[in-house]
Image: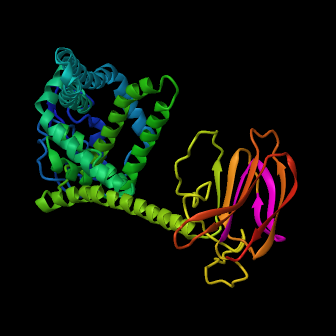
Amino acid sequence: MEGKFRCPRCGFEQPPTDDCRNCQVNIPKFIELQKRRNIIPGGAVREQEPKAQQEAPVAESIPKPEKTPERFDLTGEMPGIGDLFGRSWEIFKERFIILVVLFLLSLIFMAIPVALFSGIGYLIAMVLPDSKNLLITIGGFVGAFFGMIGMFWGIAAFIYAVVERDAGIKNSLGRGWHRIGSFIWLFSVLGFIITGGFLLLIIPGILFGVWFAFAQFILAGEDIRGMNALLKSKEYVRDRWFDVFLRLFVIWIISVVAGMVPVIGPILSILLMPFMMIYAYLVYQDLRSLKGDVAFVSSSGEKFKWIGAGTLGYIVAPLILIGILGTTFLTSFFLLKSILTSPGQEMTVPFQPPGFMPSPSPETPYPQDPGSVPPQASETGTGTTQVLPSQAETSPHDVMVYIYSLNYKGSVRLNGEEIYEIKGEQDMNYNYSGGGKFHYGTNTIDVEYESLPNPWKTEIKIKVYKYDWNTSKETTLNEWVITDKEGRKSFEIEINKE
């Protein structure tokens, strides 16, 4: 190769070299690949030519490829992951300093405006202290706005440095600034669609992420912008989605593991970012080598379809969240309703020191003392039969019993039948309010009890009272308090007809 010649793949004119400075393809390997596949760049499949004609040297007369798309080659295989790593490493070593500097500059370009405008807002707030919060907030927002522009400038320059292997820092920054608006729009649309896809239960987001993974390279290398870059990226990936996904997934896993390394994880992430970008760009180059300059549908309907798919995620996700929260709310509501309407309920609350008034809890159907809320009535602690005013005259319907226990275990019996088991748990209040099988005349309440080990305080309170169902008035008939360690006690109460 003497003098200047044109790259047989992209038509870029350059001095003799094995690698094209524009598209980075290895020219001898590309020529050999085309010979094996019998494909003319920019043309179609042709019949096998005589060997002498095939081995003709590449000359200056090789025409620049036309912009018409090449025919798809669906039988070719993409280079393996090992080959990808090897080629990425060679470029990474060559371009390491330039790429790392540009990536760090994208972070610096973002941080400087944020710090600068936030500082200005703080200084002005020192003069106008009454508006301090407002001024600092405005400074932060303005700084974030210019910081985002600076970050996109650095990212655009970084991508140009990956695509153009002979581009230096200054040249890349110049190219990035020239196309900063296009990159901001591209990444905004890309982020909107992919995020919306992930909101649609993750799987669509993965599909979108692989389809549109090469849009930034298409913008930098082919000067195709906005939604057109996304649509062309999808066309490159068509019929090879899993091959692309597998290659990108491997490098993503490596980046995640590197970022999780203690202490040096963030540094490794910064150093690995250029390698990842080179790796992804080579996947894109391999697709171009297999498919050529593909055609894609660029209609308004096609663009709207993908914008609509992303928008759908932002609509569906809140609806799903509202549905989940609504179901949880209704479940809690009906559970609370069943608790409040179930008779003879037991409530257990943590013990509180004297002088502390606990706030009402939805899990507590009755207060600790029956003086404020009408109690429920039940046949026994384990039954559900409600004692109503219409019950037989031999069993008073308006006599109730309230039991309170702290740091005891045992049981309470009324007229020989157990109405409440004291389960006993350290520093927990056990409360029971309900009706029992009282009868007119003498009634006996038996209590068996044993205190828990090392209690802070022990107490059992039993109160028998009448409740007027019409006026909600309570009248205490008798009350007993137990505080000793253990034993068995019996209490009698006389209930007379009025």
The magenta-colored residue range is 399-422
Q: Residue at x 55, y 58 (%)?
A: 372
Residue at image position (73%, 53%) is 461
Q: Position of residue 324 (x, y in %)?
A: 42, 61
Q: Is residue 338 above or below residue 357?
A: below
State the count of labels. 0
Give the quarter of the figure containing the C terminus.
bottom right
Q: Position of residue 108 (x, y in %)?
A: 27, 21
User: Which residue is more in the foreground, 22 or 492?
Assistant: 492
Look at 58% across and 60% down and name the residue there.
366
Q: Is residue 378 above or below residue 74?
A: below
Indicate left or right for 93 with 431 as reference. Answer: left
Magenta stretch: dominant secondary structure: strand
Q: In the rendered structure, does residue 492 fall within the stretch colored magenta?
A: no
Q: Residue at x 46, y 61 (%)?
A: 328
Q: How is the structure coloured here?
A: rainbow
| Residue 91 visible in the current orientation | yes
Per the image, is 414 magenta?
yes
Residue extending farthest to the front is: 498
Name the image quarter holding the N terminus: top left
**Above or below — where is 437 with respect to 277?**
below
> 397 or 450, which lies in front?
397
- Location of residue 107 in the rendering, given as x and y in whole percent from the top left corner: 29, 25
Q: Position of residue 239 (x, y in %)?
A: 32, 59
